[in-house]
Amino acid sequence: MNPTAPGRRSVLVAALTATALTAVAAAPSAVAGPLSRAPESAGAARTSVGGHGDKARLTYQKTVAVKMMRGVFEQGDMSVVDRFVRPDYIQHNPLAPDGAEALKAFGTAWRQQYPDATYDIRRVISEGDMVLMHSSIVLVPGTPGLAAFDMFRFQGGKIAEHWDVLQDVPTTTANGNDMFSTISRPRTEEPGPAYLTARNEKLVTAFVEQYLVKKDLSAIDAYVGPEYHQHNPYIPDGVAGAKAGLGAYYAQFPQLVATPPSG
């Protein structure tokens, strides 16, 4: 996101929230913490200690989300919508209508406009009835492309609801990091210990509440460690970089309001 482009102000809050999720040294499953606030369907109730739910069901949800996104947007296979998406699918992307048939029409138009697009899914996290996906999308070969976060709610084993946010990938970054890699530890798809997950959820929630909702930059001193790596391309690494970068955002957008999710 280029902070000087007024047309992208609508994704500012989502990008800042993504910044918060990378700012705190936490177990891998901490990233999925806020997702647990979403309502769960009766058929997707959590069944194991620690709130991670049944491992087979969570793996299934991740697999379905990947197959659906790659099928529609990379392979042009709209049959995956019939297999994996509910007819009453709810869409929160403001450019796309509700419904499975509308998703197929949207995907068909996408493939016609971007026939060589690739959808490189870098990480997928599932908790409760929710799936979070982080992807690198290249619409035209040889271009930097987009960074995307997609979030899905499942109901009855199918995708029932979708949210997303897209951000341009620049050719250079203020921190020297790309927008997709994990620097400080190996990637893992396994959740951390339950006690660490609960601790990290509370920590990240408190951090976002203070620095984003209240716009109190002292939260960075309280919650961010010296090893902090930043993947927002316009903010440098480190505590000082985070304070300077976010302070500049708040100065540029003084009327910014962030409302925490209810429930």
Image (cartoon, rainbow, N blue to C red):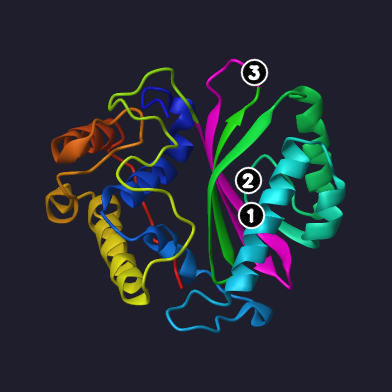
Q: Looking at the image, which residue is at 75% across and 53% down?
A: 98
* Front-most of residues 95 and 61: 61
Q: Quadrant of residue 39?
A: bottom right
Residue pointed to by mark 3: 141
Report the residue that reaches farthest toward the front.
Answer: 186
Task: Give left or right: position of 220 versus 98.
Answer: left
Vertical placement of 70 versus 100: above or below? Answer: above
The residue mark sitting in front, 3 or 2, is 3
Q: What residue type is disc 3 on?
A: Pro
Image spot of residue 216 (x, y percent):
18, 50
Image spot of residue 116 (x, y percent):
73, 23
Residue pointed to by mark 2: 93
Mark 1 residue element: strand
Mark 3 residue element: loop
Q: CA distance from mark 3 to mark 2?
A: 25 Å
Task: Give left or right: position of 115 versus 30.
Answer: right
Q: What residue type is disc 2 on?
A: Asn
Decide: few, some or many residues near mark 1? Use Cα within 10 Å; few <14, some 14-19, many ≥20.
some
Q: Earlier in the sequence, mark 1 or mark 2?
A: 2
Q: Looking at the image, which residue is at 79% across and 30% down?
A: 111
Could you say which disc has been placed on residue 162 in the image? 1
